[in-house]
Image (cartoon, helix red, strand yellow):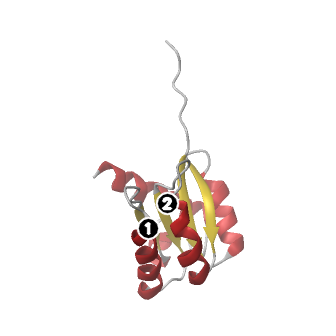
């Protein structure tokens, strides 16, 4: 019997701290491939939507990490939803209280990746 090859799930990542975003990207491997990172709302609103019109490696989710407001979250979700067509992604948040609940303080890439994995599993199981 041949072993099945598991491929990584493509995701987009919004996080305001570039260093933390890059570290989280590495910690999500091999299960998730971060295909694009944006560190500010303006770039996310303009750069994320075209990702969902593509034909290959279309993100299955947008991961939101860090210190973002509800208005920033909604602006990004609205921009993506306008253009995603049939490729409607999951929108997964990781905020300070999630990191604290995961047993860490501050922006810990290991804890953030753990939260994203747990929330994505719950979102895809529903």
Residue at screen point 48% across, 73% down = 100
Residue at screen point 41% across, 85% down = 70
Say the numbered circle drawn on residue 83: 1
Does dot 2 land on a helix, a strand or a loop? loop
Question: Disc 2 and disc 1: Cα gap in Å?
Answer: 7 Å
Residue 121 image point, x, y percent? 39, 51
Of mark 2 and mark 1, the one earlier in the sequence is 2
Nearer to me, 64 or 85: 85
Q: How crowded is mark 2: few (under 14 residues within 10 Å), some or many (20 or more)?
A: many
Residue 72 image point, x, y percent? 48, 84
Say the numbered circle drawn on residue 52: 2
Residue 18 image point, x, y percent? 69, 74
**Total numbered labels placed on residues in the image:** 2
Does dot 1 land on a helix, a strand or a loop? helix
Horizontal side of residue 22 vs 118, given as left or right: right
Nearer to me, 41 or 46: 46
Residue 122 image point, x, y percent? 35, 54
Quadrant of the rendered image containing residue 108: bottom right
Residue at screen point 55% across, 61% down = 51
Residue at screen point 53% across, 72% down = 65
Asked whether residue 103 appears in the rendered view, the answer is no
State yes or no: discs 2 and 1 in contact (Cβ < 8 Å): yes
Horizontal side of residue 103 vs 87, given as left or right: right
Q: Residues within 10 Å of mark 1 (few under 14, many from 20)?
A: some
Asked whether residue 122 appears in the rendered view, the answer is yes
């Amino acid at each position: 019997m041949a072993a099945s090859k598991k491929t990584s799930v493509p995701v987009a990542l919004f996080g305001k701290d570039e260093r933390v975003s890059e570290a989280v990207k590495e910690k999500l491997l091999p299960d998730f491939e971060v295909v694009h990172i944006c560190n500010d709302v303006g770039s996310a609103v303009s750069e994320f939507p075209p990702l969902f019109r593509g034909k290959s490696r279309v993100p299955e989710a947008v991961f939101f990490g860090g210190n973002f407001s509800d208005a920033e979250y909604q602006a990004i979700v609205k921009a993506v939803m306008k253009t995603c067509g049939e490729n409607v992604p999951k929108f997964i948040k990781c905020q300070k209280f999630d990191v604290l609940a995961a047993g860490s303080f501050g922006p810990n890439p290991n804890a953030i990746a753990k939260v994203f994995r747990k929330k994505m599993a719950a979102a895809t199981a529903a």
